[in-house]
Structures are given as structure tokens and as C-alpha cells.
Image (cartoon, helix red, strand yellow):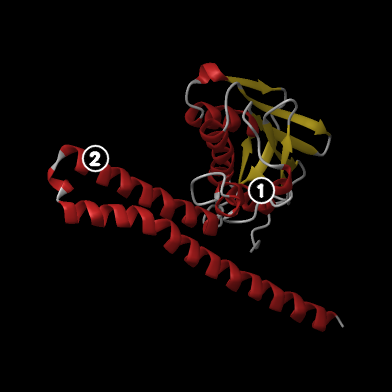
Amino acid sequence: RELAMSLTQAGASRSNALRERELILAGLSHDLRTPLSRIRLALELGDAHTDEGRAAMAADIEEIDAIVRQFIDYVRSGREEAPKEIELAPLVQEVVQANGGNMKNWTIQITANPRLTVTPLALQRALANLVVNARRHAAPPYTATLVCPDPDHVAITITDEGTGIPLDLHRRIGEPFLTRESRTRTGSGLGLAIVSRIIRRHGGKLELMARQPRGTMARIILPLQPGSLKLDDV
């Protein structure tokens, strides 16, 4: 019975991995098509000989690079990095300051500084995605908080005053390509999926909640106890 359950789980895991690979390849080809078409058209029209045309082509190349980098981030999710014990407060402070844009729009509230064993670059990547999402797709003022809501967990939250995400999409947070399906945003739709995947590897979870009267709160909850990092997470 145990062998049958193990084989069933292994088969399901393999099926999910194959489906995810197909989604990634399909999404990558879809997202690269538009900037590549613009570059091809610019070359055919001779725009490469003008300053404006070269600037537009350079912007398209940067977009392609960002798309490819985001897909790579989704696949890796910190697997290439060795776990390390760090203080969490400096990491949160540095990520918000580096990615938040105009810091006059931000309030940072830190009431705890636990030490966690994490993959630091991956955790920075996850938090940076939340900060950048708030700045690009919502509205100030923004707030970043770090608290220990109970003796066993630490919570990092990013709040904004934007229009928020439709309630029917909250339960699907973490699915790849959600943005494209919802047709309410531009981009690859992998930002929150990357965050969710990284946080799951750390034994935590990502929550997204509507705020009243407007805005969204994204919350990362991580366990404080050692040994939560799931190095073999798919």
C-alpha cells in the first residue's frame, strides 16, 4: 500500500512537472513574440538608423531580457543557492530601499529581527517582486512591515492604496500566468508565482488580502523554527 501511494505521488509529481514545463515553454514563446515582432518591423522600416528607432529597439531588447530572466527565476526559485542563517530585518530594509523607488511614498515598520536559515538571494527576489508589483501596479502610500505575530512565525507585509486585485483571483495567487488570464495587467504573470514558489520552499505561505476601503496587502508568513527549508521542492 505504501509503495502504491509512493508510485502514485511520483506519477502525479512527474505529470505536474511536465505540465509546468509545457506552460513555461508556451508562455516564453508567447511573451517574446511581441518585442521580437517590433524589432523585426523596425529593421524592415530602417528605424535602426535613427536615434528614436535605436532607443526603441534597445527598450525591446531590455524587455526580452527581463522576460527571460523572470522565467529563469521561476524555474530556479533559489535551488542554486546554499542556505544561510541571516537577520531578517536588514534584508527587508535593504530590499524595500533598493526597489521601492521614491522612499517618500514608503513607511517601513520593523518590530522584530529574527534569525532564519534561508536562501538569501531567493528570499530577496521574492520580496523585491512584491515591492515592485506594488509600485508598478498600485498607488502610494506604501507600507512594509516585519512582525512576529506569534512565537512560531514571522510575517512580512507589503500594503498599497491601489484598486486591488479582484476577489475571485485571490484564491489563485501563485498560479503561473495568472496575469495573462485575468487580462488586467501586462507582463508575464510570473511575479507572484515566483514569490509563492520561493516562500513554499522556505516552509511558509503567501497571502493576498483586500484592504478597506481600497488597496491590497501581500503577506509572507515564514516559520521561525529551523529545518523548514525544502531543498527538494518541485
Q: Which residue is rendered at x = 17% and y = 47% of the image? A: 47
Callout 1 secondary element: helix
Whether residue 26 is situated above or below residue 60 in the rendered picture: below
Residue 191 lies, in percent from the top left, at 55, 47
Label number found at residue 199 = 1
Q: Residues within 10 Å of mark 2 (few under 14, many from 20)?
A: few
Seen in the image, is 156 located left or right of residue 33? Answer: right
Lateral position of residue 28 relative to residue 10, left or right: left
Toward the viewer: 195 or 148? 195
Percent x, y of residue 100:
51, 28
Q: Nearer the viewer, residue 40 or 93?
A: 40
Question: Is there CB contact under 8 Å for labels 1 and 2?
Answer: no
Residue 137: quarter of image: top right
Q: Which amino acid type corresponds to the residue marked 2 in the rendered image?
A: Ala
Q: Is residue 167 left or right of residue 44?
A: right
> Which residue corresponds to the image point at 43% horizontal and 56% vertical from the top-left?
31
Which circle, 1 or 2, is nearer the viewer? Answer: 2
Viewer-side residue, 119 vs 25: 25
- Which residue is the extreme one toward the right? 1
* Quadrant position of the N terminus in the picture: bottom right
Q: For the residue labelled by badge 2, is the local secondary structure a helix, a strand or a loop?
A: helix
| Res 55 label | 2
The quadrant where residue 110 appears: top right
Q: Mark 1: which amino acid?
A: Ile
Label 1 vs 2, first from the N-terminus: 2
